[in-house]
Image: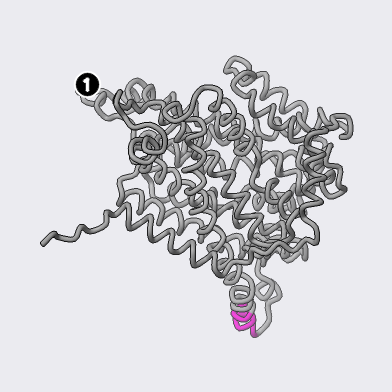
Amino acid sequence: MIARREPSPLARTTTGFLFVAIVCWIFADIAISTSDPWREFGLLLKGIVTPDFYATNSLGLALAYTLAFALLGVALANIFGFGLALIFHSRTVRVGCAFIRSIHELFWALIFLQMFGLSPLTGVLAIAIPYAGIIAKVYAEILEEADQRPLSAVPVGAGRASTFLFVRLPDAWAHFRNYSMYRLECGLRSSAVLGFIGLPTLGFHLETAFKEGYYSEVSALLIMFYLVIATMRIWMKKPLLPVYLIGAVIVLPWGVAFSLSNIIRFLTEDIIPYPLRAGGENMMSAFGDWLSLLLLDQALPGMVATIQLTMIALVATGLLTLVFFPLISPLLLGRAARTGGHTFLVIVRSTPEYILAFVLLNLWGPSMLPAIVALSLHNAAIIGHLIGRYTETIRLRIDAAKGANRYFYEVLPRVYRPMLALLFYRWEIILRETAILGILGIATLGFYVDSAFADLRFDRALLLILVTAMLNICVDSISRSIRSRLRLQTTLEQR
């Protein structure tokens, strides 16, 4: 009698997540509600192939603002993130970083908008604060996963500072530099998206042009954005960084004034729950009613929708990654085909999820489908790019199988673990983006946060943002536990 073989932990985890995603898909709202989406899609395609670079007023200035916000925000985030990474072993620092990175840049921007208005400080801080928490986590993990063998050669009595500077840091520095470049690419996407709340970046002009049906203008704006990101390795040189940072400070309109009294009122009154602010004999009872009503009517349905959309997008990202990574793998395709694959992945991963979801929502109508497609395409392009590059390090036997057999039996088993590691690592990021897509009208937590800001109910908005942060922290904790249990490591060039 042959003993039945138990499924591996990797197989059980994969099956479990696939099952959850299928259940979430069954109950998801994925209807296309627009009357003639194909006609509108045809107009969009026509605009894409006929870009109009002269339609946008001050296109150069909008591009300069987009670069300036990203450069200053990411530079500040690197400085503080590196410092926090050195003390990341502290539980207080880990929890603090988890909290600030769990709040999306747009949520931070909406908060700072109430204090500083449409000033450069709003955009720079909205990028710098969450990115500092992300960078601290990544840098700390890079240091933790770095090769420990050089430490055995450290002379007895060497100080901790010397050991870090001359032994640990050189080994991790290349990873830091590469990740900083990737984080700047993310910063450019975040900076563009900040235009959707009124800051003068490319997103502001993109939203206006799309809503008015000027698709040739939309095409020109996106092409400019893609060119900036695609040429980063050319124009982003270390000797020029101080010049860029000084230029970023100069170009931003720092003359925009903000009121200190507004800041004080926002911090001491507006964000205090209304029942506590109003006082009275039944203050605590009124606060309990206010809290339970907000949690049951907004926070709970927002959390359910956020988790539902996140799980579908997570699994869809994994499935699309299996299709995307061969596009640039030298083990599976020739040079000409890989060039086309690289171009496709650069375009898809360079398009912010928010912008892609915005476009699809206008084409298909308000449902979860545009968000699922936008999140899956963007994140699969990122992970597919990384896994495709990872296959460049794999050496196969001369007599290895060809075609589909090579993919399924030679390449896929070697890349599946690193792919899962990156997928679980981006789980937290997908959740952050899912929550913020509610601003576009999808009933995730961001929908209720945006509605609260629109109604000037800042106390409700802050509580819902805190709920979003707590949910993100929980997902991050589960993700780290799964990666640890499955022994999945994420030290690739980017995350």
Examine the rendered structure and indicate whether residue 135 appears above or below residue 339.
Answer: below
Q: At which x and y percent is residue 52?
A: 85, 32
Q: At which x and y percent is residue 115?
A: 73, 51
Examine the rendered structure and indicate whether residue 56 appears above or below residue 18.
Answer: above
Magenta residues (range):
282-289
State which quadrant residue 221 falls in: top right
Q: At which x and y percent is residue 444?
A: 63, 63
Q: How crowded is the residue under tag 1: few (<14 C-alpha within 10 Å), some, or many (20+)?
A: few
Secondary element type, mark 1:
helix
Task: Decide which of 448, 340 is in the foreground and name it.
Answer: 340
**Residue 179 shows up from this direction:** yes
Examine the rendered structure and indicate whether residue 48 appears above or below residue 246.
Answer: below
Task: Decide which of 445, 102 is in the foreground and name it.
Answer: 445
Q: Main secondary structure of the magenta part?
A: helix
Residue behind mark 1: 153
Horizontal side, residue 450 vs residue 301: left or right: right
State which quadrant residue 446 falls in: bottom right
Looking at the rendering, in which quadrant would you find the N terminus?
A: bottom left
**Residue 271 shows up from this direction:** no
Horizontal side, residue 484 vs residue 423: left or right: left
Whether 283 is among the magenta residues is yes
- Which residue corresponds to the image point at 59% horizontal and 21% vertical from the top-left? 233
Q: Amino acid at mark 1?
A: Ala
State which quadrant residue 6 falls in: bottom left
Q: At which x and y percent is residue 56?
A: 87, 34
- Which residue corresponds to the image point at 78% horizontal and 37% vertical from the top-left? 48
